[in-house]
């Protein structure tokens, strides 16, 4: 509440008394420091609008981008980081901007763009930046399923690599799950592919459903005629039989994603345990 | 008198500026990147079957959930519409009662043939045809242009 | 993109960014560049600084309308112009557009009846517009016939729309239902949905045939016969309902096209 009152006072004093461009900028910076990001963006945009000679852009773009980044508007943030990058001259700051842009693209799941940002880093990195590069590269490679490269990057960030090593071996085992195999198994016996990837519930479900329809078809065929069984139960059997094996393939793909996600987060847990983690 | 204006100004401005977000939570750099890959979770909650008002709705919701869990889950996605035929069924029975809802559902099942896509609007995200029993068919009015 | 848009507006101004003049420039820029939410804030401030300027108020109402905050917009109008009937014409038009966007047609009509700034001719056009939007073509025709000026492009456009709407061939839901009662599917074919009609025919036909066969073979007490029969009856009744619905959809689609046309005419005229 005190924060709110304080802000009301600041903003209204500005509104009532008016400000020069410099004062406005420093007001925006105050809001920025107070982490009032969306309010800060509004004031920064005002400065940009009245900045006739383009003197302030350099100072502002990165802050606007940071505000947008912190309010989770990653697409807009990436665009402002782009502007900040080109108006910046210091290599060290440029690298930091590249990292932030890479982060935006990672969160937007545009992995190739993120990778390009990492390729744009300067050859000689500043203190702490090479570890940061490893951190981002590890994530990008993992997201792009390039696990050997990812392992290398993750390992270079920790002093003791045993756990990371174990996690990547676990990840290798995930790669052995084959959606195609699950599909073929379920073609042979409905439900088998689901059992293979460890989905007992759907395996039993598929088995009972197709098995039941099969039984009904055979019974009708023996009791009446097979032609009749064909038109009454075969379409249903066919539907859930093909449904079963396509689902088996999908379940396998989902399981792979689920497990990879788990391993990935365990990798991040390891990084978080490191002294001086990001 | 002037004081009154200033006070009003305070309140107006603070209202306008503050309702946006003051939360601005700080996540750690690692925390931000925990969801950059797909977690594979595809489970969906069937809200259609909730908030039943009478026995008939409970019965139909039960049938719907049984169908969704044990039968539809084993099927390929074959319905050409969104919401799907079973969802349409439960929604229309709930909204229009068993008789009219039932008729609407039987009609919908025959329309679910994919032969007349031009009769419906396309939902781009899922590439399915829109046919929602809850929707009132209004036309866009004065468009928001100028 | 926004940043690129920013530059052309940066010319000659004094140093104080929050002066009335500068705020006005900034507000105009925000409105023009489509940042309507920010524009509402800027104009709220400007109206606060100068509460007697009508053009600022107009832009404020406009910003509320364009940012989709219809209710706040209406509330602010009632605060800025307690006597809504006295509102100047442009403001009255903005207010009308908000009401029309909200489909608050009765409120809109009673506002037009009272408004002193909207000329009688415009009132007729506005009322005709809402009646068209509300699918009441006959009432719209009655309203439009009070309009004298034949040269007016909007009135002429509406007249053509109404002619087509009132004289165009419609499909009767009753006939469609009746046709489908006699031969399943024909009602849908009549409303030009012959593919759906054919499918309905096949569904009902197959179920009826199966039911007939079962009864024939296993007698009246056979469960399968009853199951096929029930499903078939379900499809049969559903199809009668669907045929009437199909006719209504057919008519509605025609009217919708005309309403879209009316909407486009309205937007170019006002």
Image: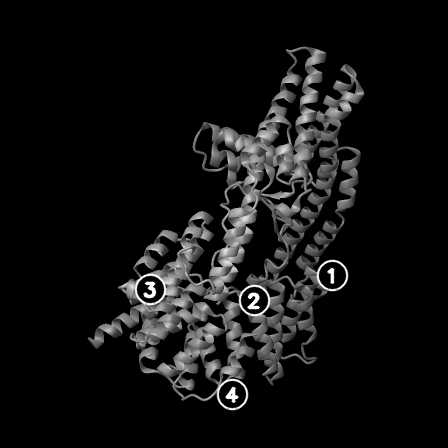
Q: Which mark is residue B65?
A: none
Q: Earlier in the sequence, mark 4 or mark 2?
A: 4
Q: What x and y, as percent, mark residue A248?
A: 72, 40
Q: CA distance from mark 1 to mark 4?
A: 44 Å
| Residue denoted by label 3 | C76
Same chain assignment for discs 3 and 1: no
Q: Secondary structure at mark 2?
A: helix
Q: Is residue B18 above or below residue C220?
A: below
Q: Nearer the viewer, residue A64 or C230?
A: C230
| Residue denoted by label 4 | A55
Same chain assignment for discs 1 and 4: yes
Q: Secondary structure at mark 1?
A: loop
For the residues bearing labels 3 and 1, Cβ distance under 8 angstroms: no
**In the drawing, does residue A212 fall left or right of residue B13?**
right
Badge 2, how many Cα within 10 Å: few under 14, some, many 20+? many
| Residue denoted by label 2 | A74
Q: Secondary structure at mark 4?
A: loop
């Amino acid at each position: 509440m005190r924060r709110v009152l304080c802000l009301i006072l600041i903003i209204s004093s500005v509104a009532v008394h008016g400000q020069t461009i410099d004062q406005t900028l420093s007001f925006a910076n105050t809001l920025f420091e107070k982490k009032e990001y969306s309010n800060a963006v509004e004031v920064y945009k005002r400065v940009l609008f009245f900045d006739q000679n383009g003197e302030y852009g350099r100072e502002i773009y990165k802050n606007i981008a940071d505000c947008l980044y912190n309010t989770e508007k990653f697409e807009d943030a990436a665009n402002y980081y782009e502007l900040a990058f080109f108006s910046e001259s210091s290599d060290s700051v440029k690298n930091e901007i590249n990292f932030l842009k890479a982060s935006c693209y990672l969160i937007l799941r545009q992995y190739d763009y993120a990778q390009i940002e990492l390729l744009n880093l300067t050859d000689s990195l500043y203190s702490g930046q090479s570890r940061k590069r490893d951190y981002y590269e590890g994530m990008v490679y993992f997201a792009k399923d390039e696990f050997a490269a990812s392992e290398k990057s993750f390992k270079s960030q920790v002093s003791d690599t045993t756990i990371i090593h174990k996690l990547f071996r676990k990840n290798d085992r995930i790669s052995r799950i084959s959606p195609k195999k699950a599909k073929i198994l379920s073609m042979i016996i409905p439900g088998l592919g689901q059992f293979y990837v460890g989905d007992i519930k759907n395996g039993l479900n598929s088995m009972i459903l197709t098995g039941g329809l099969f039984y009904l078809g055979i019974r009708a065929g023996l009791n009446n005629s097979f032609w009749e069984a064909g038109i009454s139960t075969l379409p249903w059997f066919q539907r859930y039989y093909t449904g079963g094996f396509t689902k088996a393939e999908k379940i396998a793909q989902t399981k792979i994603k689920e497990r990879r996600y788990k391993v990935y987060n365990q990798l991040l847990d390891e990084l978080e345990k490191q002294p001086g983690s990001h | 008198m002037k004081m009154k204006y200033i006070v009003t100004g305070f309140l107006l401005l603070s209202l306008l500026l503050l309702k946006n977000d003051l939360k601005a939570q700080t996540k750690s750099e690692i925390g931000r990147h925990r969801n950059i890959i797909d977690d594979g979770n595809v489970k969906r909650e069937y809200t259609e079957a909730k908030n039943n008002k009478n026995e008939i709705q409970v019965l139909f919701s039960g049938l719907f959930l049984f169908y969704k869990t044990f039968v539809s889950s084993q099927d390929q996605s074959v319905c050409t519409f969104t919401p799907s035929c079973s969802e349409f069924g439960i929604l229309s029975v709930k909204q229009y009662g068993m008789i009219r809802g039932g008729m609407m559902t039987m009609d919908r099942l025959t329309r679910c043939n994919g032969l007349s896509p031009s009769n419906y609007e396309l939902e781009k995200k899922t590439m399915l045809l829109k046919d929602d029993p809850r929707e009132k068919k209004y036309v866009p009015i004065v468009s928001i242009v100028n | 993109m926004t940043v690129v848009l920013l530059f052309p507006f940066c010319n000659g101004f004094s140093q104080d960014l929050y002066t009335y003049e500068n705020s006005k420039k900034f507000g105009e820029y925000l409105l023009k560049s489509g940042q309507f939410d920010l524009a509402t804030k800027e104009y709220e401030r400007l109206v606060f600084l100068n509460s007697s300027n009508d053009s600022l108020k107009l832009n404020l109402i406009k910003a509320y309308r364009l940012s989709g905050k219809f209710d706040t917009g209406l509330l602010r109008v009632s605060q800025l112009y307690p006597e809504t009937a006295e509102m100047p014409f442009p403001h009255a038009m903005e207010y009308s557009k908000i009401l029309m966007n909200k489909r608050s047609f009765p409120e809109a009509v009673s506002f037009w009846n009272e408004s002193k700034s909207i000329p009688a001719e415009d009132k007729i056009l506005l009322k005709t517009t809402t009646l068209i939007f509300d699918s009441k073509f006959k009432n719209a025709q009655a309203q439009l016939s009070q309009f004298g000026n034949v040269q007016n492009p909007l009135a002429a456009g509406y007249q053509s729309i109404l002619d087509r709407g009132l004289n165009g061939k419609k499909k009767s839901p009753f006939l469609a239902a009746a046709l489908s009662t006699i031969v399943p599917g024909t009602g849908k074919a009549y409303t030009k949905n012959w593919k759906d009609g054919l499918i309905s025919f096949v569904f009902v036909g197959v179920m009826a045939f199966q039911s007939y066969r079962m009864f024939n073979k296993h007698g009246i007490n056979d469960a399968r016969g009853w199951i096929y029969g029930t499903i078939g009856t379900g499809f049969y009744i559903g199809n009668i309902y669907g045929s009437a619905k199909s006719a209504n959809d057919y008519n509605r689609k025609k009217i919708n096209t005309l309403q879209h046309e009316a909407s486009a005419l309205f937007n170019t005229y006002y």
